[in-house]
Amino acid sequence: MGYNTNGYNVYRETGVKTASQGKLVVMLYEEAVRQLEKAISLIKDNSFIEPQQIENFGNSLQKVEDIITELQVSLDMEKGGEIAKNLMALYLYFNKELVAATINHDKKKLTFILNMLSQLRDSWISAASSTANTETKLPPDRPTLNITG
């Protein structure tokens, strides 16, 4: 890796470690959307994926599943009320559909999930920006999912 790439990774890692909780959720959604777009781009007509791209396809979808799992465990079911319950149901649905889409290379299903995650990301962006000055930082010892890979 070159100097510029390493510097960027350090910058990104610092951004993740110092992000507010709302910003961290946005970052997770952004990475999930990016990985889904990457996976979808590998699917050709008739659900075909070039043999040399199958590993990349699987890795991208595994990252999306990991991110959705991180979003699930970060839900505060006690304080979140109905919204947390609805998000949990969506996350469970997304992971179930991702498993099926991974096996079948179902572009339509992945595109649907991508659209839903994009809408959720946009909602979180609005929420995070409207509360940016009132949020507290996460404690530095909180384990987080590495989305910089």
Image (tube, rainbow, N blue to C red):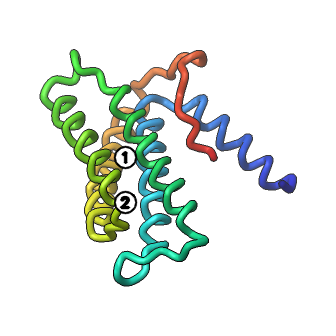
Q: Return the x and y of residue 66 as percentages of the image width and height.
A: 45, 40
Q: Residue at x 23, y 21 (%)?
A: 77
Q: Residue at x 17, y 30 (%)?
A: 85
Circle number at residue 125: 1
**90 relative to 36 in the view: left or right:** left
Q: Secondary structure at mark 2?
A: helix
Q: Quadrant of the N terminus?
A: bottom right
**71 relative to 2 in the view: left or right:** left
Q: CA distance from mark 2 to mark 1?
A: 32 Å
Q: Residue at x 43, y 60 (%)?
A: 36
Between residues 60 and 17, which one lies in front from this camera angle? Answer: 60
First reached walking from the N terminus: tag 2 or tag 1: 2
Which quadrant would residue 131 be assigned to in this image? top left
Q: Return the x and y of residue 103 as percentages of the image width and height.
A: 37, 60
Disc count in the image?
A: 2
**33 relative to 139 in the view: left or right:** left
Which quadrant would residue 113 be assigned to in this image? bottom left
Circle number at residue 138: none
- Please state which amino acid type lies under the numbered disc 1: Ile
Q: Are marks 2 and 1 in contact (CB under 8 Å)?
A: no
- The crowding category of the residue bearing disc 2, from other C-alpha atoms within 10 Å (few below 14, some 14 to 19, many at least 20), is few
State the residue position of label 2.
103
Q: Residue at x 42, y 77 (%)?
A: 48
Between residues 116 and 8, which one lies in front from this camera angle? Answer: 116
Q: Secondary structure at mark 1?
A: helix
Q: Is residue 55 above or below residue 42?
A: above
